[in-house]
Image (cartoon, rainbow, N blue to C red):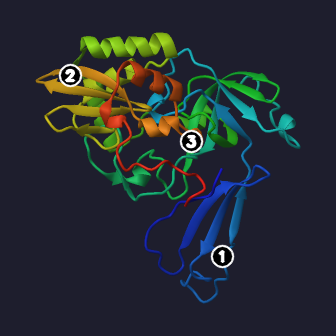
Amino acid sequence: MPSQEGFRWPRPAGHVIFRYGFGDDGCLRLLLAVVASVCGSCSGCGPLDPSLTIRPIGFLRSGKGVRFKTLHQPDEAAAETNVLELTPGPGIREALRDLEGMERLWLLWWFHRAESWRPLVMPPRGPARRRGVFATRSPHRPNPLGMTPARLLGIDGLRLLLGPCDLLDGTPILDIKPYVPAYDAFPDSAAGWIDTVAALHAAPPSHAVVWSPLAREQAEWLQAGWTVDFRERLEEILARDPRPHRTRRIRALPGGDFEIGCGAWRAVFRVRDSEVEIVAIKPSFPVRFLQEAWRKDVPDREAQSAFLNRWPCPELEPRAGDLPGDPSMP
């Protein structure tokens, strides 16, 4: 995995810039380049340590390749099994001792697709309002660490079988800790703006969602031929609030329609009073991306190509002047 730069803001003396990536030995390295060799707050401070190394203990296999497929909080009622594949190493097998009998675990992990951090972010739930990142669960953090509780279903050697979770496939797991209800649960604690949004979501959905004949045919074709099915998640989002929202990837189109991103797919819809009609589905990636074999990270590539053969989309076709991509060029 290539190194990625994280902090992107004017850097006053004493701050650090931050890069991370996986080394050849599998370590996740945080490289801290110090802007000033001392912090500047007092004369007695010495140089800051230039590096910090974290070694992932394993990687999660969830089958969720795009964010749209992950709920913002796991659905505990879902019949879902995820696998934490631990990396073999000295002491790892012994470290699993005494996990039997524990119903839940805390997973501490790395937002491996986060490329930068923002002090203000727009959470996907609630109105389109920016909030301080430390008051959210956003991945765009100074240090993109995440934590989630997961039900422990079983242990098979160096594989932990886990219940529903909200992590993407390949997420690096940094640590495991026991979930202790007596210490870790405070259900009566106030959660500020999150309580307000939760009360709004407890109310019935504000819109009814219907499908046009074309959109229904396309969705059923994707599910039957390619096991691609995002209808339930799409309907849930649009029924709650179909207004344009950056994090929910909803934008207005010329002519009055709207479009929402659904991972590797997009849905076009229109709103009439309290009804949302999904008009059509189309791929997210242009034809050129689907044809360039060196692009290894295009989800549902074959399904998108087959879809475009059946339902051509002129806006995704190569345009005059488009140059083929060359991975060797900067």
Q: Are marks 1 and 3 in contact (CB under 8 Å)?
A: no
Contact check, label 2 and label 1, Cβ < 8 Å? no
**Position of residue 265 measured from the top left corner of the image (x, y, whole percent):** 40, 29
Residue picked out by circle 3: 295
Mark 3 crowd level (few <14, some 14–19, many ≥20, 10 Å Cα): few
Kind of element beneath mark 1: loop
Q: Are marks 2 and 3 in contact (CB under 8 Å)?
A: no
Disc 1 or 3, which lies upstream in sequence? 1
Q: Amino acid at mark 2?
A: Val
Instruction: Please determine whether, in this image, residue 208 is positioned above or below residue 18.
Output: above
Residue at the spot 79% in from the left edge and 39% down from the top edge = 87
Q: Nearer the viewer, residue 27 or 178?
A: 27
Residue occupying the far right of the picture: 90
Residue occupying image coordinates x 58% and y 65%: 18
Q: Is residue 324 left or right of residue 81?
A: left
Q: Which residue lies at the image location 51% right of the left edge and 16% below the top edge?
A: 226
Residue beneath label 1, please?
Answer: 48
Residue under label 2, please give it.
276
